[in-house]
Structures are given as structure tokens and as C-alpha cells.
Amino acid sequence: SLVITLSTSAITSSKMKDFFRIRTITAFIRLSSDDFNEDTEESSLSGISTLKQKIQRCSVFLSSLQETFVESGYTVQTLRISTNAFGEYLLDDDGGISAMENRLSQLDLALEECGIGFCSLGPAKTVDEIRNCCSRIISSSPRLACSANVNANDIDASKAAAECVLSISAATVPEFLRGGMGNFRFCSATCCPGNIPFYPVSYSSQEDDSFALGLENGALAHVLLSQCGSISNISKIFSDGMTSALQPLQKICEDEEQKSSSFKFLGIDTSLNPSLDEGGSVAAAIESLEEVCGDFGGTGTLAAAAAITTALQSLPSIKTTGYCGLMLPVCEDQRLAALTNMRVTNFLSISSVCGVGIDTVPIAASTNNQNLQALMLDVAALATRWNKPLSCRVFPVGNAGEMTQFDSP
């Protein structure tokens, strides 16, 4: 557990690493249906399938980079692999699902044998893929994540995605799905590009192997925003502090890219992402700004979120990828979880000027498909109107007004 004493005094570059963790090093690869064929000449010569060769190559690279970061004093929480959209390799040539179960088993075994605990299979791109595949992927292994692409005004896709969420939340078998845990690994997504390192929207849009970083940096946000005091200082003090914190990470990644020559460095997702540690709340960090009146969500919150997002997306000399916005996952931010004034509509409003959408928001288990579909359509409309990546990840558990508890990595 990261225990931090927050200070508003300036912190040196060498001390920056004490205020954040590397949440994920995510490798991006492309799979094809041929990778699952164990009868190819290449597989015969090596004794292992092309699929496992690709997973193994990623695992070796990720472990090496993790070791370099740890030696430099950083904490790395997870190593992840994201693939191209699963419809390109899990399904039969005619789009059928007869081969999917076997290929999912092969993939899960390869991940297990190579020590990879997280793998995102990308988005379902059609209504049939949402209905026939997403729940099966989530129930096949606790390692696997996926998303459903929902465009603005797409009634059929939003309905199918809502049905999928409710189906996952009701599942009790396998055991790792109990309590709605499967919905940590599924969401609807709109306007989300490839190469976002965070789950469950992550997928590869590169032809070549590549990698990116995602952070857990709520404590750093608290320090820097406390130093700012006012929104007017975010463009200078906050921006300079974030740049100083990220430059050493970028240098390590660029050196590793040169050393490996096989994995391209795509950048850092600079998003503010909370931790559950004391002092790790992004919402509490924003409340430290004098223009934010009262609790997070009150007047001034929107202005603060917009200023922070602008800074995160324009850090000088930092190579970026992904959301580069403000993450407000209710189940992962203690201050957000404690607020009783926040409603889904509040999060939608804030999403209009930052990322990520509706994230880890508990809703009543009695929520019907129509209401959930309507929420996904609202998110899709907002994302499309402003051309920004947004997702909708909700947990239908318990009754309205009850305390909700989760235990997830």
C-alpha cells in the first residue's frame, strides 16, 4: 500500500516517483485465425503454436521493461496485452462462433503459461458480435476483457450491449463472475481509438508490436493541484510538474524501444487516475482548487476539469496516447464513493470536457434494459458530438441507496 504525506511544497524530479505508480505496461499485438493453427510449418519446427510465440514474445518484453522500471525505483502494478478486434481472429471465416470456444481456451492457456494476467480482446463491431461473443468472452476467463462499439443513435447495438451488462451481472458461474465482478472487464465504447493502455476499451490498431504506459497518479495530482491553488496556475505549475514526472518514464521507454527494436513505443496515457490509498483521490485533489465551491461536482468543477484536461493533452515534449483526460471511476476513488450528491448526469456533464465517461458506477440491480440502453446512448451521443473517446462501464448490483462493496485488482 502506498502511504503518502501530502505537501504543497515543490517536489524534486527524483521524488516524483514516490507520488505515482505505473498502473499498466500494455503491449499491443495483432492476432489472426492462423495463429491458432498448431499444424503450421512454423509451429511444427518450434514445437509451439504461433499464438503462444506471440504471447511469449510480449511476456519477455514486458517483464524486461518492468525490471528496468523497478531498478529505477518505480512500482509497476500490471503487465497487459491488448489485441486487435476479436472478430478478426476468434470467429469462423463466415462469422460463426463454432471455433470461438476452442480459440478462447488456447489463448487463455497461452496467457497463463506466459504469466500474463490481463488481456483485452478489443471491441465487438457488430450487433451479432455483441450478442454472441461478449458475455462468452467475459465468462471464459478472469484474464479476458472486451468492449462493445456503440455509435450514436445505434439502437440495436446499445440494446445488445445493455443486455450483455445485465447478463454478466446476473451470472454466478463461474465463481469469478459472482457479485457483478465480470463487469469490471466489459463496457460500451464510442469514438475510442486504438492503443489506449487502460481496460476494458483497450485494443491494438497497429500492424507492428507496440507498447504504452498508463498511470495511477491521484497522489501526484493532489500535490500539484495543491501547489496550483487556482485554476489560473494549472497551465504552468501543474503542466510543468506532470512533465517533470513523466520525462524519466519516457526516456526509459525510448531506450527500451531502441534496445528491443521489435516493440514500438506509442506513448504515455497522461490521464489522472486515482488510487484507493489515502491521498489518492482525484476528486479530492480537484477540491483543493479555490474555484471549486464545496464538494466535487459543485460549481467550478467543470472549469477545473477542462483546465486539467487541456494541460494533460498538451504536455511539452511528452509523447502521448490514449485518453489523456480525467478518470473518475466511482469504485476506485474514495472521495467520489463517499459523495452523495453525484448522479450519473453529473458524470455525463463533466465528461463533456474530459474523459472517460461513466466508469465503475454502481446502479441498482433492478435497472431495466431500456434505462441502461438509454444511458449508453447518452454517452454515445456526447462522444460523437464532441469527437471524444467515452465509455460506459456500470455495475448493476444491490438496491438503490445501499452500500456497494467490491474487491478487484
Image: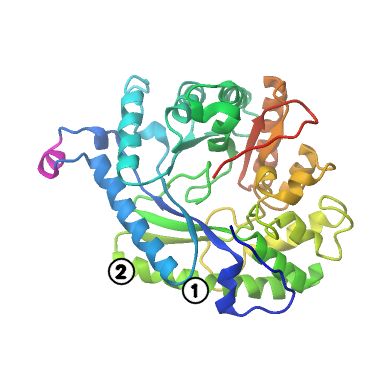
Query: Is 94 left or right of 274, judged from the image as shown?
Result: left
Which picture quadrant has residue 357? top right
Q: Is mark 2 on a helix, strand or loop?
A: helix
Q: Residue 248 carries which label?
A: 1
For marks 1 and 2, give the CA distance: 17 Å
| Three-letter residue code for mark 1 | Pro
The residue to which callout 2 is attached is 259
Q: What element carries label 1?
A: helix
Q: Is residue 122 visible?
A: no
The quadrant of the rendering that contains the C terminus is: top right
Asked if residue 164 is positioned above or below residue 264 in the image, the reply reads above
Which picture quadrant has residue 108? top left
Residue bounds of the magenta highlight: 40-46
Question: Percent position (x, y) of residue 95?
Answer: 37, 23
Residue at the image point whose x is 81% and y is 65% from the top: 289
Question: Percent position (x, y) of residue 22?
Answer: 52, 60
Q: Can residue 266 be seen in this view?
A: yes
Asked if residue 91 is positioned above or below residue 82 in the image, the reply reads above
Please rate how many residues cluster around mark 2, counting C-alpha atoms within 10 Å: few if below 14, some from 14 to 19, many from 20. few
Asked if residue 69 is positioned above or below residue 382 in the image, the reply reads below
